[in-house]
Amino acid sequence: MTKITLKIVLMLGVLAVLIVSVAGCTSNVANNATSSNTPGTNTPMAVTYANNYLTHLKSTLEPNNTIPSSNVVQNGSDAAQLTFTLKNTTPNSIWANGTATTMAFNIKQFPSVDAATAFYNSQSFGYTIMTNDSLKGTGVPQGVVYAQTMGHNATLIHGASKIGSGSSFLQVTGSMIVQQDEFVVWGDISAMPV
């Protein structure tokens, strides 16, 4: 499998993950907390962001794509975990019966954009930087999810990805990280034949 083929498969996975970016019908929020980061509530805005991410992804699925499983879990007072599987049954030149892509992401709301940028910079070392133009084809939520969560557009969007060292013909792995103002989303992607 060529490096370009692996990159294409990874970008398909990133696209699938980022399409998931809006509020989910299948979310599990600890203690049935309301989705707000205001005093007196238990659910961080990161959970709202994760649910919005999942809803957005579901609303933008192409034919032959489904999300058979997904989960949003609160992780502390300022973070969430988003996991889902995207199944694509469209035959392609790599795997004849399509792919199943599993994604596991952490979503954290930092106290400031500077704090989020410092974290992004420390995590994305060695990754391939994605520009705003290259993010468009990956499904990365370029502000849609942020705007739905915060009520205004993000002013800063960064993205980076890398292909995992364990990739083979039967499985492609990778990692990605995206910053939208004070939110950072990072995690792993794994794609394999159906």
Image: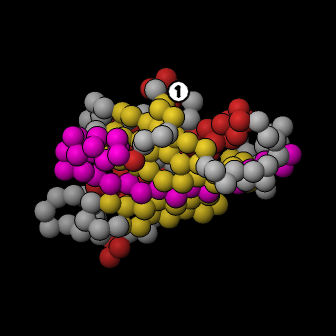
Quadrant containing the C terminus is bottom right
Residue 50's quadrant in the figure? bottom left
The residue drawn where x is 51% and y is 34% is 128
Give percent across and percent down for residue 8: 68, 35
**Residue 191 visible in this rendered orientation of the protein:** no
The magenta span reads: 96-122
Residue positioned 28% across, 40% down in the render = 117
* Amino acid type, mark 1: Ser
Extreme-left residue of the structure: 39
The residue furthest top is 133
Side of 40 relative to 115 (left or right)? left
Residue carrying label 1: 134
Percent of width and height locating residue 173: 64, 51
Residue 159, percent from left and from top: 44, 36
Tell which of 61 and 165 is nearer to you.
165
Tell me if 78 is positioned left or right of 136 in this view.
Answer: left
